[in-house]
Image (cartoon, grey):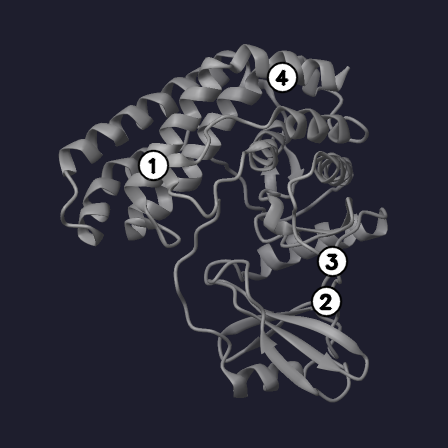
């Protein structure tokens, strides 16, 4: 599940002026690219030299340090043979250009299709994450780097406190007391999961460079193989197990689109969970098996953090009612908590 607020698209005149910074030939056609974060609008640009994606960076994600770091990571991954879409250097040799206060990047347009929820795709995605972690473990970086994660975050508790009022502002007929009770229950689940992770020795873990947001929307496939991993905006330093747990949650969650949120399944898909883990073990953190008990509580923290913050901001999760999605999160977190032992056993078998 992903959610983003609404922002304006790329201004036509400004976008064409930005494209002049790159040597890609005459622009034949531009069109908005649907999907992805609405806070980072994109164009598909067609020229005689091929198709490209022009991206305007989201506010707050365009500091020189963050750009240099994320671009260095994706370029290191490309050199290691990981399928990625690396930024194209402009006429000045930079991998980004600033115009009218906005930061632009240009990428090759990768031909590929989206996630179709097969176990084979989950295995390929797990392998891609493992290869990225292998690159990130070797990558040395000198300078400011984004760190921190969804684990033990006070931002999540504050979001759960503010969410009922935000939901009521969008839907005045809801029972705010019920919403408060729901958020308190979710807060308890988050607190208990966070404490369990700490008790399992989280503070002793080392940090490394990770993708930070590997979900099905950030992977393009060709058949059941990964064509490209995209969107390194959330690249950061953190223990690899956090990145693994969040990605596993995304690829193992069952679909529910096209039906009412209340009918969406809370349980994880065992086949995709096993496949993603089997793919990851080919290249990923060899120490994961020793700390595998951290994965279920980290998944609980991840699903709560993913939803609570946007709901607190807008009362909605994308276009979905915030209260319904929070109720789904409670069910999913409770399911993971109740089945944690079985999840750990499946993970250990897949990592063996």
Mark 1 and mark 2 in contact? Answer it, CB < 8 Å.
Answer: no
> N-terminal of the two: label 4 or label 2?
2
**Residues at marks 3 and 1, CA–CA distance in whole angstroms:** 32 Å
Point 75% across, 62% down: residue: 111
Q: Residue 348: which quarter of the image?
A: top right
The answer to whether residue 148 is visible is yes
**Residues at marks 1 and 2, CA–CA distance in whole angstroms:** 35 Å
Circle 3 packing at 10 Å, graded few (<14), some (14-19), many (20+), is some
**Residues at marks 1 and 4, CA–CA distance in whole angstroms:** 27 Å
What residue is shown with label 2? Answer: 109
Residue 325, relative to residue 228: is it above or below?
Answer: above
Question: Which of the two discs, 4 and 2, sits closer to the camera?
Answer: 2
Circle 4 packing at 10 Å, graded few (<14), some (14-19), many (20+), is some
Residue 18 x/y as whole percent:
61, 81
The answer to whether residue 151 is visible is no
Point 60% across, 39% down: residue: 237
> N-terminal of the two: label 1 or label 4?
4
What residue is shown with label 1? Answer: 326
Q: Secondary structure at mark 3?
A: loop
Q: Residue 292's mark?
A: 4
**Residues at marks 3 and 2, CA–CA distance in whole angstroms:** 9 Å
Q: Secondary structure at mark 2?
A: loop
> N-terminal of the two: label 3 or label 4?
3
> N-terminal of the two: label 1 or label 2?
2
Q: Quadrant of the C terminus?
A: top right
- Whether residue 76 sits left or right of residue 308 in the image: it is right
- Whether residue 262 sits left or right of residue 179 in the image: it is right
**Residues at marks 3 and 4, CA–CA distance in whole angstroms:** 33 Å
Residue 214 x/y as whole percent:
62, 43
What residue is shown with label 3? Answer: 112
Q: Secondary structure at mark 1?
A: helix
């Amino acid at each position: 599940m992903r959610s983003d607020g609404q922002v304006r698209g790329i201004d036509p005149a400004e976008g064409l002026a930005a494209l002049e910074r790159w040597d890609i030939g005459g622009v034949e056609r531009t069109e908005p690219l649907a999907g992805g974060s609405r806070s980072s609008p994109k164009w598909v640009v067609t020229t005689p030299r091929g198709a490209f994606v022009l991206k305007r960076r989201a506010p707050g994600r365009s500091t020189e340090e963050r750009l240099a770091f994320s671009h260095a990571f994706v370029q290191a991954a490309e050199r290691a043979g990981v399928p990625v879409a690396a930024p194209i250097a402009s006429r000045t040799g930079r991998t980004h250009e600033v115009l009218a206060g906005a930061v632009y990047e240009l990428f090759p347009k990768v031909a590929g299709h989206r996630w179709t929820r097969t176990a084979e795709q989950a295995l390929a995605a797990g392998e891609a994450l493992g290869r990225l972690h292998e690159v990130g473990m070797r990558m040395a970086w000198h300078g400011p780097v984004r760190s921190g994660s969804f684990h033990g975050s006070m931002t999540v508790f504050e979001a759960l406190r503010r969410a009922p009022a935000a939901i009521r502002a969008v839907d005045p007929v809801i029972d705010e007391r019920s919403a408060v009770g729901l958020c308190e229950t979710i807060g308890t689940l988050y607190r208990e999961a966070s404490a369990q992770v700490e008790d399992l020795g989280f503070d002793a873990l080392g940090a490394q460079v990770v993708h930070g947001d590997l979900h099905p929307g950030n992977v393009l496939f060709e058949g059941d193989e990964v064509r490209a991993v995209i969107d390194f905006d959330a690249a950061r330093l953190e223990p690899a197990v956090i990145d693994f747990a969040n990605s596993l949650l995304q690829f193992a969650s069952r679909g529910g689109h096209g039906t009412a949120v209340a009918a969406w399944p809370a349980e994880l898909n065992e086949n995709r969970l096993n496949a993603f883990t089997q793919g990851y073990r080919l290249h990923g953190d060899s120490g994961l098996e020793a700390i595998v008990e951290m994965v279920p509580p980290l998944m609980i923290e991840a699903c709560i953090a993913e939803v609570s913050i946007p709901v607190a901001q807008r009362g909605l999760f994308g276009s979905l009612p915030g209260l319904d999605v929070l109720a789904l999160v409670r069910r999913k977190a409770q399911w993971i908590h109740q089945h944690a032992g079985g999840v750990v056993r499946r993970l250990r078998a897949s990592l063996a």
